[in-house]
Image (cartoon, coloured by chain):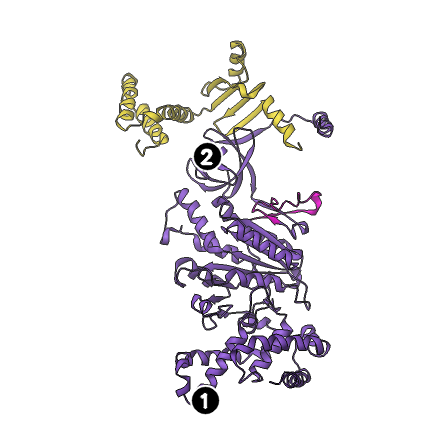
Chain colours: A yellow, B purple
Amino acid sequence: MSKLSPQMYARAFADVYEAAPENVRNMFTKRLFDVIDKNGDWSRAERIIREIERFITKKQGGREVQLEFARPVPLALINELKKRFRAVDRIDVSVNTSLVAGVRIVIDGERELDNSMARKLKDMFKKEL
Amino acid sequence: MNYDLVEKLKKELQGYRNSVKLEKIGTVVEAGDGIARVSGLTEAMSQELLLIENSRGEDIPAIAFNLEESFIGAVVLDSAQSVSVGAKVKSTGRVLSIKVGKELIGRVVDPLGRPIDDKGALFHHPEDADDYLLERSAPSVVDRESVNAPIQTGIKAIDAMIPIGRGQRELIIGDRQTGKTAIALDAILNQKNDTARKTPICIYVAVGQKESKVAKIVKVLEEAGAMKYTVVVSAPASAPASLQFLAPYAGCAIGEYFMDQGQDALIVYDDLSKHAGAYRELSLLLRRPPGREAYPGDIFYLHSRLLERAAKLDKKHGGGSLTALPIIETQLGDVSAYVPTNVISITDGQIYLESQLFHQGVRPAVNVGLSVSRVGSAAQTKAMKKVAGKLRLELAQFRELAAFVQFASDLDPETKRRIERGQLLTEILKQNDREPLPIEEEVVVLYAALGGYFDGMPLQQIKETEGKFIQYLRALHKETILEPIQKTGEFTPDMEAMLKGAIEEFKRSENL
């Protein structure tokens, strides 16, 4: 594993990608994987990709929004929710059964709006019992 | 079924208000060795208390130590094993604090203020407790006044030659097994003997000590009735480095609470070498650059900011004081190592214990030549000052001649006399541990020894004679000699004449 952090990969890739003409951009994606392979960083490939996505979203002025539901929800509801965010925001929808019920929204991995049953139960039982 | 719990649960459910609010969170990206690297929480403060949610949904406290460009290096304060990668981290917006109050007296607590003595919970009524920050700036220069009242250790050698004042920082330094803890413990035990002043609240902070040693110390304090005015803060060797690092600051916060109440407090840090070791461990795990002896660059500040919090406040601020007795363990008597020199330079003097003296049977093994108290003499009682003025000089003269002790028979009478007096005074200053003497008894014994009343007596008899002499005075001259010295702290010519008479009388009765 190299000393390069996923953030370093993200910054380098985003700079090169944006500076290049559109017709050659796909080539950079392939090269990114070659570099990851050369540096022996395959174990961190997922984190690197996530970091690149985050970096590009931020550079375009968007936010990274994570919508977590306790169970699968209809597509119409997801689309309705997506409309409440901006077009540049990157929205990731997932199912997290540990929430028991409700929804949890995390913005940029830093701010959280937790309206899940798990949180409510924890708050209730945390006090005195 | 436990119906109490059911009723409690019902009340909780009835009174529950769902409040959803936007919270600042982070995520653990790396965890191990009591350290967690956290992404997010870009607005976290240095030293801020964080809460890491473990797999069981419990909140594990941690402190933000390293604020880096994209991560926070946090020190986990509880069982770090349950912290896993991906765990949610919440900021609290406050730095670490400890609940303090009078209920702490007589208790043994950990550095987070949780009781560990099986005597039940603390602070049933929240109004009895105050929150004190573990890291707090020291009182400013204008809030302080000079040290002016003594803290009696009950150890003749210290009270006579290295006096300690209330609000002073006096280092106890020496190799392992030289009696450092014994001196600190005697100082705590002796506080109940000093009836002329209000008994200070004592705080014993055990850092990286064996749990058996801490248990033994608590037992000694309990048996001597000293737990009535003592708090023990324990972060034993088995505790994580983070708690060992916090223990002195927690003890200091407790001491500050009593100081702010206008009371006097005495705190023993046993010991700061292990504290420095714990901080070194944390710093290296946090990948801070190592410096001399692999300690981080701010090792001096670690101890200076702690010891600067010891102070004597002026009347306007309640007149309380916090006296600090930090302990440092040296390796093979090397006082020039990194941490010992740092702490020597921070404190207002040091009591240097020597293993050679200890093995020669000189206990407490205080090296009078290397020990010093820079401010304590201003606080020494007049009686002790008057009596012990010559002691240091006579011992210094004896030290110069000590090499010739084995040729004593070939020496001139004056040199021989000085050697004999030095030997007698050394014998007088010997004292068993856990037998601290009240100040008035120290004064009369030293007066008799320095006045030459014990001269010519075989050295083996000195200890026994001293004991008999004290018993004699307690039985026959308590009201006329001992109590006046204790109450006034003075040694007037009248008292001196009376003591002289009592000594002559004692010598006659014992055929000395």
Task: Give coordinates of residue A44: x percent, y percent.
Answer: 35, 27
As for residue B119 lying within the magenta part, the answer is yes
Looking at marks 2 and 1 on the same chain, the residue that comes earlier in the sequence is marked by 2
Question: Mark 1 = which residue?
Answer: B414
Residue B116 drawn above or below residue B456: above
Residue tagged by mark 2?
B38
Quarter of the image for residue B157 reads bottom right
At mark 2, the secondary structure is strand
Q: Secondary structure at mark 1?
A: helix
User: How many numbered badges does the structure rendering display?
Assistant: 2
Subunit that carries the residue with mark 1:
B
Q: Residues within 10 Å of mark 1 (few under 14, many from 20)?
A: few
Q: Is residue B104 visible?
A: yes
* Marked residue chain, label 2: B
Where the C terminus of chain A falls, by quadrant?
Answer: top right
What amino acid type should be assigned to the residue bearing mark 2?
Answer: Val
Foreground residue among B162 and B218: B218
Residue A119 vertical position relative to residue B502 in the rendered view, above or below: above
Q: In the rendered structure, does residue A58 fall within the stretch colored magenta?
A: no
Foreground tag (2 vs 1): 1
Picture coordinates of residue B487, whole percent (x, y): 70, 73
The part of the chain drawn in magenta is: B108-134
Where is residue B242? Give x, y as percent: 49, 44
Q: Position of residue B78 (x, y in %)?
A: 52, 39
* Lateral position of residue B279 relative to residue A74, left or right: left
Left or right, residue A31 beside residue B69: left
> Where B332 falls versus B510 (above or below)?
above
